[in-house]
Image (spheres, rainbow, N blue to C red):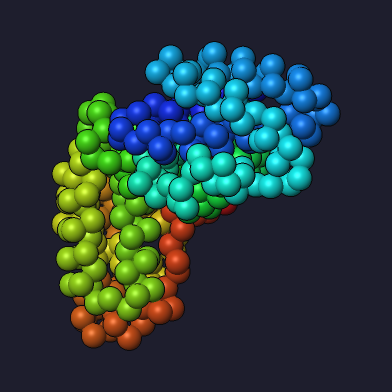
Amino acid sequence: MMKFLIVLILALFALSSVNASSAIECELCEYAANYGELLIQSNATETEIIDKVENFCKVIPSSFQATCDSLIANYGKQLIQMIVNKESPSTLCAQIDMCASSTEAVQGILECDICQFIVKQVNKYISGNATEAQILKFLDTDCEVFGKGGSVTCQNIVNNYAPQIINLIINNASPSQVCGLVGLCGSSLKIEEPVQGELECGVCEVIAQQCSNYIKANKTESEIVGLLDQFCSTLSIFESACDTIVASSAPKIINLLLQNQSATVVCTEIGFCGNSSSGNNNHSSSEESSSSSQPSSSSESSESSYSGSMTGASSGSASGSGSGTSGNMKIYIK
């Protein structure tokens, strides 16, 4: 129950920031219904369910307690019966006029909160020396706490961003930094200024992921660089680091991705990821090594060669072969 309440409180604080009373009522209804569903599955009686849900209303922020109490008083028994009849929380809350046809107005805010919840869970699992495969399995279970509607959003975030999230956490990013960097929290969010160079690996891998998307879309090198410049402008405090990496390494990133290298391998190869304590120093030495060992034709590919060969590039998952370490913590990336 405690995890469920923490998630609810996160969502309610997010909703309070957008002054959407109808959305708040809808979220309260759906979370109460999800909680009721869990209680029914545990064979609790109707009286026990009502009592527990009433207590549930007492632990949420005070500004929402009256709405929660009113919901349970007016619709508690009806909600329970509808849950017993296998109605989904979103359907039953719409039927009692607590939800409109959608809650798209707060979707972005909820994605941000769900992302930060995921990051905190990942940080916990990394501290326990879990492998990436174990973390993904744990997160699948964690997403269930959001109910049938929110769990889809949660699972999408896990599927699309988990490798990037893991690598950013290994590089000591905070939850707000991670979620801002992967684009799930807005630039207005207050976040700490990162230590110089601390997040270069994570920024590089996000850039490589974006490059992979552009490569799959058959963009030319100049088009990719232009799109990356636009992408960097969305990264708030990470914009400068992003611009620097794009300016210095975009052609190398593209060439390595065209060789079907993963984002992690790409960023290790050009010196932004790896065992070096200084991304910039490692970057310089890697550039020298790369330029001396690779044929000049690879680094000087013509514009036309990109557009003809990009469909064969790797999708560029932010995770690649190898491992990342942080202190005594060890995590293996697929």
Frontmost residue, 322 versus 50: 50
Frontmost residue, 330 versus 215: 215
219 vs 259, left or right, is: left
Q: Is residue 288 visible?
A: no
Q: Quadrant of residue 269?
A: bottom left
**Image coords of residue 59 (percent x, y):** 53, 14
Indicate whether 247 appears above or below 79. below
Q: Quadrant of residue 10?
A: top left
Indicate whether 72 appears above or below 130. above
**Residue at 76% from the left image edge and 20% from the top image edge:** 47
Frontmost residue, 95 versus 198: 95
Frontmost residue, 325 versus 183: 183
60 vs 139, left or right, is: left
**Residue at 34% from the left image edge and 36% from the top image edge:** 20
**Residue at 35% from the left image edge and 52% from the top image edge:** 206
Indicate whether 220 appears above or below 249. below
Q: Quadrant of the N terminus?
A: top right
**Image coords of residue 85 (percent x, y):** 76, 45
**Image coords of residue 79 (percent x, y):** 66, 35
329 vs 78, left or right, is: left
Q: Residue furthest right?
A: 43
**Image coords of residue 151 (percent x, y):** 57, 44
Q: Is residue 217 visible?
A: yes
User: How many marks overall?
Assistant: 0
**Residue at 51% from the left image edge and 28% from the top image edge:** 8
Q: Quadrant of residue 188?
A: top left
